[in-house]
Image (cartoon, grey):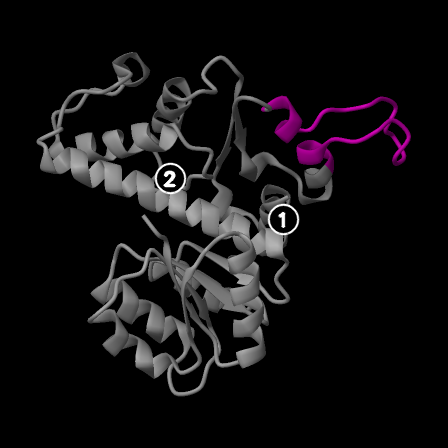
Amino acid sequence: MTTSILIVDDEQSFLNSVMRKLRLQGYTDLTPISNPSEVPKLLQSKTFDAAFLDIIMPEMNGLELLQIIKEQSPQTECIMLTANEDIPSVIQAIKYGAFDYLVKPIKPDQLIHALDRALERKQLFNILLMRQKKGFKDSFNNPDAFKEIITCDEKMLQLLHEAELHSQSDIVMLITGETGVGKELVTRAIHLASRRASGPFIAINMLAVSPMLFESEFFGHKKGSFTGADKDKLGHIAKASDGTLFLDEIGDLSMEIQRKLKSYQVK
């Protein structure tokens, strides 16, 4: 099945650039739109698997368009594009249902990486919906991974089935909830159900990580790279190789450090 992609940006040169990059990767069902006000009518006759949306546009900005798309076509995975990393706008976009955001100028590998991850998540949700329609409620492919979680609540079971589906992917996951609801417990279950189960599970409380030592703690360092570095040190990311790295309380990190983590993940 052909993947349908919507690109909305008021700059024609940027639209052309994105189209070229996507065509080089084999995508053919592409719909470029320079006027965002045309999109609502278009959604009545065509559905899209993914959409790239510029945030700053005349007549209708990307956040307004995102809300319309999610109302009319909730299955469309949206990736926001911005020339200026306006943090409040980025946060609002995520709340409205955006999958990711990219900062211009955008490198081809960043564009394709974000699209691949968005389409992978869409595929996982499609599988989940199919299972629900078939009455797939209380059996797991890997029940041992979830044996520490006891529940008869239908919504909780649905969440756990979704977690098991995501365990087969390498997509970065965000698990939210109040303190004590079992976020780490669910994360360990995902690890045990995944291809990475034989690897390490490393849980890091981000509130205990010093901002001054963040890069050394997460990315490691070589002996002599700075005063006091008397030996090579593996960072948390390297230690979790072929396993799972759980970052607890990540929402309390500064945006600067979150950007460093995001840039490493994109690479």
Measured in 3D between alpha carbons, the distance from the residue under mark 1 to the one under mark 2, in whole angstroms, is 20 Å
Residue 39: image x %, image y %? 31, 76
Residue drawn 37% across the image and 82% down it = 60
**Which of 28/101 is in front?**
28
Mark 2 or mark 1, which is nearer the start of the sequence?
2
Instruction: State whether residue 151 is above or below residue 59.
Output: above
Q: Specify few, some or many for label 1: CA neighbours under 10 Å numbering under 14, 14-19, or 20 or more.
A: few
- Residue 106, position in %: x, y? 61, 62
Q: Secondary structure at mark 1?
A: helix
Residue at the left extreme of this rendering: 135
User: Which residue is label 1 attached to?
Assistant: 263
What residue do we see at 24% from left, 35% from top?
A: 159
| Vertical placement of residue 38 versus 225, above or below | below
Quarter of the image holding residue 129? top left
**Magenta region:** 216-240
Q: Quadrant of residue 216?
A: top right
The amino acid on which the numbered mark 2 sits, given as a three-letter code, is: Ile
Q: Position of residue 188 (x, y in %)?
A: 40, 22
User: Taking the image as drawn, is residue 155 in sight?
Assistant: no
* Residue 232 is at least partly visible in this image: yes
- Kind of residue sitting beneath label 1: Ser
Residue identified by numbered label 2: 175
Is residue 228 part of the magenta span, yes or no? yes
Q: Position of residue 61 (x, y in %)?
A: 41, 78
Q: Is 6 left or right of 82, judged from the image as shown? A: left
Q: Is residue 129 magenta?
A: no
111 with respect to 79 (left or right): right
49 on left or right of 169: left
**Rendered position, 208 above or below 11:** above
| Type of secondary structure dominating the magenta stretch | loop
